[in-house]
Image (cartoon, helix red, strand yellow):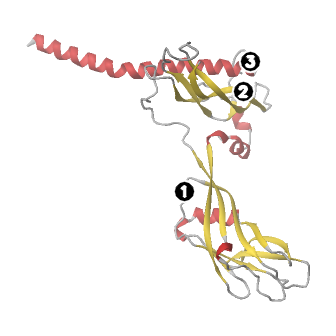
Amino acid sequence: METAFYYFLLLFTVKENWGRSIPDHETKWEKQYATEIKLNILKQLQMFESPKQSNFTQIYPQSLKERLFDDEQEEVTQLIFLAKIDQQYPSPQITVIEEHSPIEPDSKITLAKMSVFITPTIGDSDFFPILIKENDILVSSVSISKEHVGWIDIDITVAFQKWTKYPKNGLKSLSLFCSSCNNQHINISSEKQHTPYFLVHVIKKKSPRQRRNFWTCNEDATCCSRPFYVSFQDLKWNWVLSPKGFWTNKCMGKCKDGNLNNSGCCAPKSFGSITMFYHNGDYILYGKKIENIVTKDCGCL
């Protein structure tokens, strides 16, 4: 009975250590790689060590932080919403066809334009303003020539931001008015090739971190690129205002002996840069482009 007990205890210990060996190995190379990157950045900033820690981030306005933070972690997507025209007199209405917005709640609208095809309009002046309203509330305006023929882009960013903020209300309609057109109808083409549309720029922030998993790229694989996130918070670099971190790659794996260069070394082939905003203890905000800090591709060299 005692022998069986020690046998099962041995199996349990081996199993536990085996389960921990991979994460420990992962943590070891991650720390080493982070240290290499850390020293590289300090060298480019001409620093021997990190500036003294402080609460300097509290003195900068929130608006500045929002403009600087995580530009590298933002992905801009362009969406196009087709619209339909309701030729009401004297103000035609433009309505988005889609019943439900595909824009996710955590996204940010940075730009929204409505494009319509205008044909010549009768008026007293050479130029006339077109007012864009939603339920009699002015949303935007644009001035065009009475002889204008072609597409016009109208900025409706504020309106679109409001629509997506309250998605349950759905996407709305906009009316076009012209107060100086002698009560004439604004001429918007209804030809199929002139279908009006909305162009929207959406930014969805990527998660700065991904759940840890065992990537297929490792030291036993053929030369490959292993994604790696550098967190300035983990480095305890609170003197860096932006970005919070950045993605790079770690070159891992083996090279075949038949490689032309015959060096058998898996190494970076191309690099990228980041822009850092930081202070060095004097409360002055500096911006510096850190060259060749991001490994883009790996190969046998």
**On the rendered structure, is 145 left or right of 109?**
right
Kind of residue sitting beneath label 2: Glu
Number of the front mark, 3 or 2: 2
Position of 181 relative to 99 (above/below):
below
Q: Quadrant of residue 52?
A: top right
Query: What residue do we see at 71% from left, 75% from top?
Result: 133
The Cα–Cα distance between marks 1 and 2, rounded to whole angstroms, is 35 Å
Location of the C terminus (image quadrant): top right
State which tag comes first along the sequence, 3 or 2.
Answer: 3
Q: Label 2 near label 3: C-beta < 8 Å?
A: no
Residue located 64% across and 76% down the image = 192
Q: Is residue 65 left or right of residue 20?
A: right
Provide the residue designation for mark 2.
Answer: 291
Residue that numbered label 1 is attached to: 105
Using the image as rendered, state which of residue 249 and residue 235 is in the foreground: 249
Image coordinates of residue 129 in percent, x first then y, are 83, 76
Query: Is the residue 297 above or below the residue 166 in the image?
Result: above
Q: Secondary structure at mark 1?
A: loop
* The furthest residue to the top: 3
User: In the figure, residue 228 lies in which quadrant?
Assistant: top right
